[in-house]
């Protein structure tokens, strides 16, 4: 195919009116992208690069969409198809892996459908494989492709009536008369295994928190000399390990065949910054109206100012395509920072509770203490932490002496958490001096969700005091909400957020400290003896009996 005739980049679109008339259109060119290898006079791409129909199969995709499908690509889709389709001198795709980051609702599913139909009916590759962590997303793109193929006068005769379309769950396949297939599967260790994939489409890459799915699907591409993988997503958080790793490598140009094309707002921008919104949303002012983004942006800013950051976090990832630490933080970082109040629990031993908790992998154990202050706040302070191989046994041996020094009124643990095994050993321990005198050994019998949500509520209300312990600060920063039935949640222990035992221990200690009965009144013995005279005797000094001055 030859490139389409030159045309206005917005000729296929009805430009959406803007509220003020002076707001920018969404950026056709990504803010961050890998430059082409090809040099020379500018080609017909329109961005000043030298790519032509001889050095990019993207021009054929553009012509296919325009002339065959009758669905011209949007300007940013056209740009991406050309740059993502760059070819090496031997005809192979320049990019083995194409990483695309763009805000939601800008037409990435439409682009994927166009690419899949082109690969299937024009290039006639043997296998296209689509994956997503949510199979419904992969099914949506696949079903869109199937419906378009069934309705097209050129494609429909090329689909066998028997076996051409298979919609059985988990086996969805579109097969052409030439044996070319488009299949989909879930992102798991089985996705793509035992297959030889020519084109891989991975949607919502940010949701892949381990390398299991990536390794299964991408490695099935390795035997294909002309194979290519397209990863399309918006930004995620620190748990998006695959996305974060690929993006880091692409920005460093660590792999010459890994290309990145990122439409995103610059870090630190305001949520309603017009230039940032245009940089992340290439269809803004075209298919997306400005008021549909500016209103939610300002609402999210107001919520953030009121101490509710969730809306702003979601807006940054979904609309500005920016990476955040957590998508659904359990503890508001700003509220936690406001609770910083260095101090000590040394004078509060009659109110002290200690809780011990462990990480799911057994690689970390933490004991934390808490007590209710005179002003009603709850102070939390570290007791001890153990890490590394065998740390659970080390903690078990160390706790008796440690508790004898700290002298809390209560030692607790979560009976359904990973610290239960350690605590059970302590509960069932049969040895002299255990438990230490005055220490009650107990399970935290309250619902775990109530403890976690209660601690988050205390933080939000400024009713927690902490001294800035680095371990607890780190676990607070890592903790996401693990949602449970009934609108409840706990601190997540999954994926990269496995080590939050310090937060569990602190929350449990705060709960026990608030539920401890008041300490008994001190016993006061009034001495019924006359004051010593003639100078203080050793007995008077030892028992603190006052003496008569000058006697």
Image: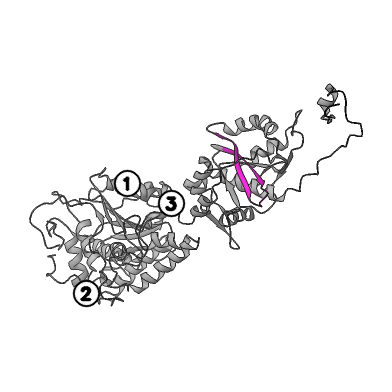
Image coords of residue 23 (percent x, y): 27, 71
In the image, residue 146 sits, relative to residue 437, either above or below, namely: below
Residue sticking out furthest to the left: 41
User: Residue placed at 70% from the left, 50% from the top?
Assistant: 445
Image coords of residue 344 (percent x, y): 61, 40
Q: Which of pointers 3 and 1 lies earlier in the amino acid sequence?
A: 1
User: Magenta segment: does it hold 283?
Assistant: no
In the image, residue 506 sits, relative to residue 280, either above or below, namely: above
Q: Spatial distance from mark 2 to mark 3, Cα to Cα? A: 38 Å
Kindly state the secondary structure of the residue where label 2 is placed: loop
Kindly state the secondary structure of the residue where label 1 is placed: helix
Mark yes or no: residue 414 visible: no
Q: Which of marks 3 and 1 is in front?
A: 3
Instruction: Left or right? Give the position of 378 relative to 477.
Output: right
Residue sticking out furthest to the front: 550
Q: Nearer the viewer, mark 1 or mark 2?
A: 1
Q: Which residue lies under the disc numbered 2?
A: 12
Dot 3: few (<14), some (14–19), or many (≥20) neighbours within 10 Å? some
């Amino acid at each position: 195919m030859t490139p389409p005739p030159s045309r206005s980049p917005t000729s296929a679109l009805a430009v959406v009116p803007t509220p003020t008339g002076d707001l920018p259109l969404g950026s056709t060119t990504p803010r961050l992208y890998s430059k082409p290898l090809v040099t020379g006079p500018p080609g017909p791409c329109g961005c000043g690069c030298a790519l032509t129909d001889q050095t990019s199969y993207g021009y054929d995709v553009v012509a296919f969409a325009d002339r065959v499908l009758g669905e011209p690509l949007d300007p940013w889709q056209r740009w991406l198809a050309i740059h993502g389709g760059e070819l090496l001198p031997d005809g192979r795709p320049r990019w083995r892996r194409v990483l695309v980051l763009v805000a939601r609702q800008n037409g990435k599913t439409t682009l994927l459908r166009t690419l899949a139909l082109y690969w299937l009916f024009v290039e006639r590759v043997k296998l296209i494989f689509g994956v997503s962590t949510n199979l419904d997303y992969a099914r949506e793109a696949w079903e869109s492709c199937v419906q378009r193929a069934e309705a097209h006068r050129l494609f429909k005769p090329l689909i066998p009536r028997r076996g051409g379309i298979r919609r059985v769950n988990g086996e969805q396949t579109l097969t052409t008369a030439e044996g070319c297939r488009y299949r989909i599967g879930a992102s798991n260790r089985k996705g793509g295994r035992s297959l030889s994939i020519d084109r891989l489409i991975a949607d919502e890459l940010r949701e892949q928190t381990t390398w299991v799915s990536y390794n299964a699907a991408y490695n099935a591409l390795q035997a294909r000399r002309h194979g290519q993988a397209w990863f399309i997503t918006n930004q995620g958080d620190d748990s998006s390990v695959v996305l974060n790793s690929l993006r880091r490598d692409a920005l460093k140009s660590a792999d010459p065949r890994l290309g990145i094309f990122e439409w995103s707002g610059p870090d630190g921008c305001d949520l309603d910054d017009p230039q940032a919104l245009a940089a992340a949303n290439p269809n803004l002012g075209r298919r997306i109206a400005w008021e549909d983004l500016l209103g939610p942006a300002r609402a999210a800013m107001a919520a953030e100012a009121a101490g509710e950051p969730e809306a702003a976090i979601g807006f940054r990832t979904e609309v500005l395509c920016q990476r955040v630490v957590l998508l659904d933080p359990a503890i508001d970082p700003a509220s936690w920072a406001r609770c910083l109040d260095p101090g000590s629990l040394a004078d509060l031993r009659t109110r002290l509770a200690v809780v011990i908790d462990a990480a799911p992998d057994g690689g970390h154990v933490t004991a934390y203490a808490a007590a209710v202050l005179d002003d009603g706040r709850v102070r939390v302070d570290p007791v001890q932490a153990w890490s590394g191989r065998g740390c659970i046994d080390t903690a078990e041996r160390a706790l008796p002496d440690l508790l004898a020094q700290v002298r809390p009124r209560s030692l607790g643990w979560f009976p359904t958490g990973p610290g239960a095994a350690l605590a059970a050993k302590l509960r069932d321990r049969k040895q002299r001096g255990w438990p230490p005198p005055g220490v009650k050994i107990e399970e935290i019998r309250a619902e775990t969700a109530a403890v976690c949500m209660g601690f988050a509520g205390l933080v939000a209300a400024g009713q927690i005091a902490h001294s800035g312990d680095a371990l607890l600060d780190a676990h607070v920063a890592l903790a996401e909400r693990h949602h449970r039935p009934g609108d409840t949640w706990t601190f997540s222990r999954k994926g990269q957020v496995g080590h939050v035992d310090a937060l569990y221990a602190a929350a449990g200690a705060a709960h026990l400290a608030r539920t401890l009965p008041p300490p008994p009144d001190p016993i006061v013995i009034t001495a019924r003896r006359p004051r010593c005279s003639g100078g203080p005797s050793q007995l008077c000094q030892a028992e603190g009996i006052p003496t008569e001055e000058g006697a």
